[in-house]
Image (cartoon, rainbow, N blue to C red):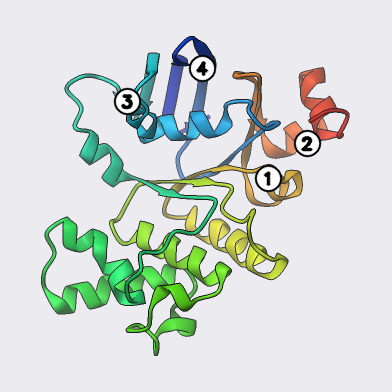
Amino acid sequence: MKDIKIETRNLSLHYGEKKALKDITMQIPSNKVTALIGPSGCGKSTFLRSINRMNDLIPSVTITGQLLVEGIDIYDKNVDVVNIRKKIGMVFQKSNPFPKSIYENVAYGPRINGIKNKSELDEIVETSLKQAAIWEELKDRLDDSAMGLSGGQQQRLCIARTLAVNPDIILMDEPASALDPISTSKIEELIHELKEQYTIIIVTHNMQQAARTSDYTAFFYLGKLIEMDKTKTIFTKPNQKQTEDYITGRFG
C-alpha cells in the first residue's frame, strides 16, 4: 500500500476497566476512502475518534500503542492537540450546524484561526460551499439561519464547515444515516469527489454504502480489527470467515 497517511501499531483503548480497542495494527492510505464496518459496539466509532484524539475528552480513557499521522505519533506528549484537530476534520452522524447564518457557520473556523479579512472569508465560504456541492443551493441565502435548512443540506453545510479550515483528513461517523435516499446519494457523490484532495475515513452500518463509496474496508468485531483489504476483496473474497458471515448477514 503506497502513501500511508495513518498507521496504528498495537493501539488499545480502555474505558476504565473495559477494553474497547484491542491491539489494532493497520495502515490507512492517503487520498482514498476507508470504510470501517462491523456490528454496533464493535469499536469502529471509538477507533475513528482516536484519530483526532476526541476520546481524550472522556475522563476514564487510557490509550496504549501508537497512532501515527504522516509518521508522527499523535499521542506523543509533545504533540500539539489543537494542531492535530486542525488537520483532522470531523463530520458527525447528526448534522450540528451552529444557530447562526449559513455564512457564519462556514466562516467560524477560519475566523478562530485568525482570518479577519472580509474578502478572504468570502472566498473561503464560497470555495467550501462549492466543494461541498451546495453553493448553488445556498449562494442567495448566506444570511439565512442554518437551522432552516433541510437535514441533507445541513449535513453538507457541516462538511463545508469542516473543509473551511483546510484539513488533510476527514473523519465521518455515519454521515448519511439520518438522511433520506436522495440526500444520502448526494453525500456519497461528495465523498467520491473529495478523496481527490483528502484522506477520508467513514464509519457506516450500511454495507451497500461501504461497497459504493470506499476503496478500502476494515471489519471490526468486539474491539478487534478482524480484517482490512481493498473493498472489492472484502466484499467478494474475504480472508476471514467472520468477515464473510457479517457481510452475508449471518450475524450483526
Task: Tell me the residue that label 1 is attached to.
Answer: 210
Amino acid at pointer 1: Ala
Give the mark nearest the N terminus, 2 or 4.
Answer: 4
Pointers 2 and 3 in contact (CB under 8 A)? no
Q: Residue 71: which disc? A: 3
Label 2 or label 1, whichever comes before in sequence order:
1
Kindly state the secondary structure of the residue where label 3 is placed: loop
Residue at x 16%, y 22% (from the top left corner): 78
Between the residue at mark 3 and the residue at mark 4, the CA separation in whole angstroms equals 14 Å
Q: Which mark is residue 2?
A: none
Q: Quadrant of residue 199?
A: top left
Q: Report the residue at 63% width, 57% height from top.
A: 178
State which tag comes first along the sequence, 3 or 4.
Answer: 4
- From the image, state whether disc 1 or disc 3 is nearer to you: 1
Disc 2 marks a residue whose amino acid type is: Phe
Q: Nearer the viewer, mark 2 or mark 1?
A: 1
Which badge, 2 or 3, comes first in the chain's sequence?
A: 3
Q: Quadrant of the C terminus?
A: top right
Q: Secondary structure at mark 2?
A: helix
Cβ–Cβ below 8 Å for labels 3 and 4? no
Which residue is depicted at the point 39% across and 16% down? Answer: 63
Q: State the CA–CA distance, disc 1 to disc 4.
A: 21 Å
The alpha-carbon separation of the residues under discs 2 and 4 comes to: 21 Å
Mark 4 residue element:
strand
